[in-house]
Amino acid sequence: MSETVSLPFPTEALEPFGLPDDGRLAATVSMLGCLFHVEAVPVVDFEGLQSGADAVSESRLNALAAEFDAPGFETVRIGVQNYVLFVTPFGR
């Protein structure tokens, strides 16, 4: 794999997404003319384990962990909350 490309992304672009009682954030980005959905899933760390901060986020995080066979993910801090970010392409 080649060198990592770093793209600026303003956290202010992320807005509440989903049900009112879950803490997910989302935005749309364009790379090379293609649209992508960026989702920020709130997580908490407890005794070295990562879990979703609410039921919907836990479900999303479990699905990601299963898909990528990963025990956890890097997080970003937005405000007082840690989030796992993931980017998926829009369908046609």
Image (spheres, rainbow, N blue to C red):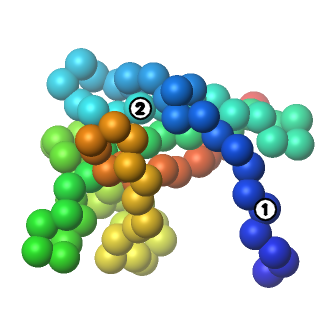
Along the line of sight, the residue nearer the viewer: 84 or 89: 84
Amino acid type shown at disc 1: Val
- Would you call the spot at circle 1 few (<14 residues within 10 Å), some (14-19), or many (20 or more)? few
Describe residue 1's horizontal placement relative to residue 59 as left or right: right
Which one is closest to the eye, mark 1 or mark 2?
Answer: 1
Q: Residue at left 35%, top 71%?
A: 72
Neighbourhood count class around disc 2 (C-alpha, 10 Å): few under 14, some 14–19, many 20 upward: some
At x 26%, y 52%, the residue is 43
Q: Which mark is residue 5?
A: 1
Contact (Cβ within 8 Å) of mark 1 with mark 2 = no
**Which quarter of the figure has residue 8?**
top right
Q: Position of residue 27 (x, y in %)?
A: 56, 29
Q: Is residue 20 above or below residue 72?
A: above
Q: Position of residue 30 (x, y in %)?
A: 77, 35
Relative side of 66 to 45, left or right: right
Point out the tag, 1 or 2, that comes first from the N-terminus: 1
Q: Secondary structure at mark 1?
A: loop
Above or below residue 36? Residue 12 is: above
Kind of residue at disc 2? Leu
Q: Is residue 47 left or right of residue 68?
A: left
Query: Disc number at residue 43?
Result: none
Asked whether residue 58 appears in the rendered view, the answer is no
Residue for point 28% across, 44% down = 81
Nearer the observer, 87 or 91: 87
- Which mark identifies residue 25? 2
Secondary structure under badge 2?
Answer: strand
Estimate the x, y position of residue 92 in percent, counting from the top left: 75, 32
- In the displayed structure, 58 sits above or below 48; it is above
Q: Which residue reaches farthest left?
A: 47
Residue at figure coordinates x 23%, y 31% from the top left: 22
